[in-house]
Image (spheres, rainbow, N blue to C red):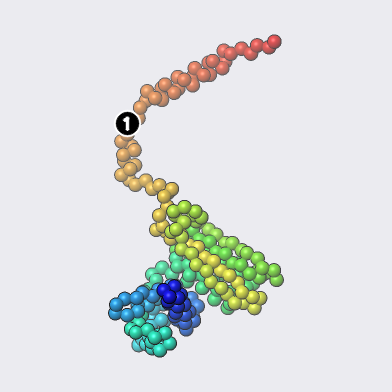
Amino acid sequence: MEERKFIKLKKEEFAIKEYIKKSLGKGKISKLDIEYTPLGEKIIILTNRPGFVIGKKGERIDRFTRFLKEKFKLDNPHIEIKEIEEPLFDSQLVADEIATALERMGNLKFKVIAYRKLQEIMGQGALGCELRLTGKLPSERSKSWRFALGYLKKAGEPSKEINRAQSTALTKTGIIGIKVAIMHPKAKIYDKIEINDEIKKQINEIPKDQNIEKTAIKKLKKIKKTRKTKKIKIN
């Protein structure tokens, strides 16, 4: 019984997310989370356009709350909106923007769209970015195209810092799948070493041992002399 309740709850959550995403349109929402509190249900929407999501005098928020109460029988739904300050580092927003651009401009200009978005992301200061487009581009047979710039870890602990997302574009030739992976400039890279001014001062203060250099030079001279004095015997 508990498993059925859990599955039913997850289905309702998925239906709520799909309804809000479809009603607002593609590329308006990055992420939507649902939290259950003693006061009621808390729905957190991450977006780069909070004014559009709220609407005039909160019309869209009121409409969403009424629909959630009537359709999904939620007791006290509370919608909270969080603004995304850096939309170019959000992989879901980037994937949705590429999808809408392909639907509007057509799949023949997919290279222009991908390279332009890649340059915008890297110009903003990202460490690395990778875009993958899969579909009938531009021929009748499906193909996978990869566009990448910068530093992007594929495995290990730093790979968890990569923000990944995917989206789909419905074009005249068919559906095109879009995958985006972005590495934030503040991501932790363990094999990257930065030397501060204090460390430079400490390195300069270390006394240089001249005796080590002298002994090394003497050894090299001895090796050269032994090579010259050696005679090759021929039987």
> SS at mark 1?
loop
Residue found at the far left of this picture: 39
Please state, as top left, top right, bottom left or bottom right, where the C terminus lies in the image: top right
**Which residue type carries mark 1?**
Pro
- Disc 1: which residue: 207
Above or below for 116 versus 226: below
Which residue shows up at 51% across the image and 73% down it?
96
Side of 134 where 94 appears, left or right: left
Which residue shows up at 56% across the image and 73% down it?
168
Query: Observer-nearest residue: 27 or 11?
Result: 11
Above or below for 211 versus 85: above
Above or below for 66 versus 46: below
Side of 21 where 134 appears, left or right: right
Please state, as top left, top right, bottom left or bottom right, where the N terminus lies in the image: bottom left
The total number of labels drawn is 1
Query: Observer-nearest residue: 125 or 4?
Result: 4
Residue 120 visible? The answer is no
Residue 2 occupies quadrant: bottom left
Side of 128 where 57 appears, left or right: left
Residue 230 visible? The answer is yes
Residue 213 occupies quadrant: top left
Query: Observer-nearest residue: 70 or 120?
Result: 70
Above or below for 91 versus 171: above
Q: Position of residue 205 (x, y in %)?
A: 31, 36
Which residue shows up at 47% across the image and 82% down it?
19
